[in-house]
Image (cartoon, grey):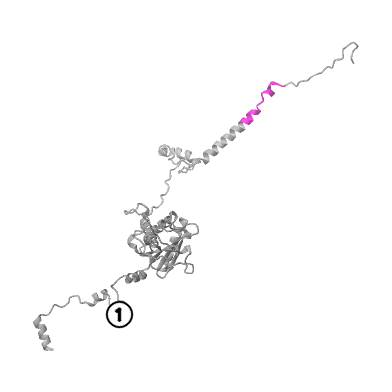
Amino acid sequence: MRKRGEQNHEIIVKRRGKKGHAEEHSSAWKVAFADFTLAMMALFMVLWIVQPRSSLQNPSAGELQSNPLVDGGAGVFDGSSRTPIELDGLPMPVRPPEAPRHPESATASADGKQPGEASEPRHYNSNVDLEELAALIRAVSSSVDALANIEVKVVPQGLRILIKDDQKRFMFERGSANLDPHFRSLLVALGGVLAKVDNKLILSGHTDAAPYRGANGYDNWNLSGDRALRARNVLVEAGLPARNVLQVTAQADVMPLHPDDPLNGANRRIELLLLTDSAEQLYRQLFSDGQAQAQVGARGAAFVQGKAADAKAAPANPPASVPAADKSGERNSH
């Protein structure tokens, strides 16, 4: 109750909670700091375990002889420890078994070839061998992204290797013998394979039936010949022995790949024919005068004996000339 005569004032009472000294300085932050420290320690431990192994030698390896405990302790987490730790004593060093060394992989040969590489070129003659070589050529062509530009087929005369254009790339520039870099890489890869082959081969250049005539009568015959020679030079530079090339021919457009479509771009190609022994022998007989031949002329066919047969028929030691007196006596006797 308000007393009479007192002014009408409102009294506000504020009550404050009293905190002790211990509550203001509690140790809750220590728990958070301990958790943070534990997490950081765990992180450092994980980074230490999974760190990439240094290419340098473990520093503790040099102290292994003087202090065997070092190797066992330093290599626990980095995986470099080579000594098992016994429970009842010091670690016993164990020498790891050495891997057997192949005699061919010890050193390279004297002629510079890599270990395991054949010292002499291989000769392919049977169909099985030629199929194996064809598979190798396809694999090498695939490695240079040129599998679409090459066809390999076993034929009765040997192995036929056909290098042609595709829809995006031409082997040569139009009207010239300038070789495209893509096809040059293919020929270089092919030359590396043929460098290890002992068979002889014939290389021919082909064009389509589109008429071409340049300066000084330069036509498809010249163009196909220059392209074949260009391909031959690249193969030889890549390792193909020059003596293995028996012939480089210009075919122009007389041997189209698609006879029904002579203007087809697929007719522009380079062909290699790897000869078998029988095919090489027939080829050599074709260009040799040492074999018997049949010559056809205006008077009919005539058999001509080769020089080799004449050499066999001729006696090794021809008889000496007979004196004139003896000859006259023989004539008189007859």
Residue nearer the viewer, 317 or 80: 317
How packed mark 1 is, by other alpha carbons closer than 10 Å (few <14, some 14-19, many 20 or more), is: few
Residue 204 seen anywhere in this rendered image of the structure: no
Residue reaching furthest to the front: 216
In this rendering, position of residue 114 left or right of residue 32: left
Determine whether the residue tagged by mark 1 lies in a helix, strand or loop: strand
Residue reaching furthest to the top: 5
Asked whether 62 falls inside the magenta stretch, the response is: no
Q: Which residues are magenta?
A: 19-33
Which residue is drawn at the image coordinates 27% and 75% (left, top)? 306
User: Relative to 68, is 149 above or below?
Assistant: below
User: Relative to 18, is 163 above or below?
Assistant: below
Q: Which residue is mark 1?
A: 302
Residue nearer the viewer, 329 or 196: 329
Residue 114 picture location, percent across and down: 37, 54
For the C terminus, which image quadrant?
Answer: bottom left
Which residue is drawn at the image coordinates 59% and 34% (left, top)? 38
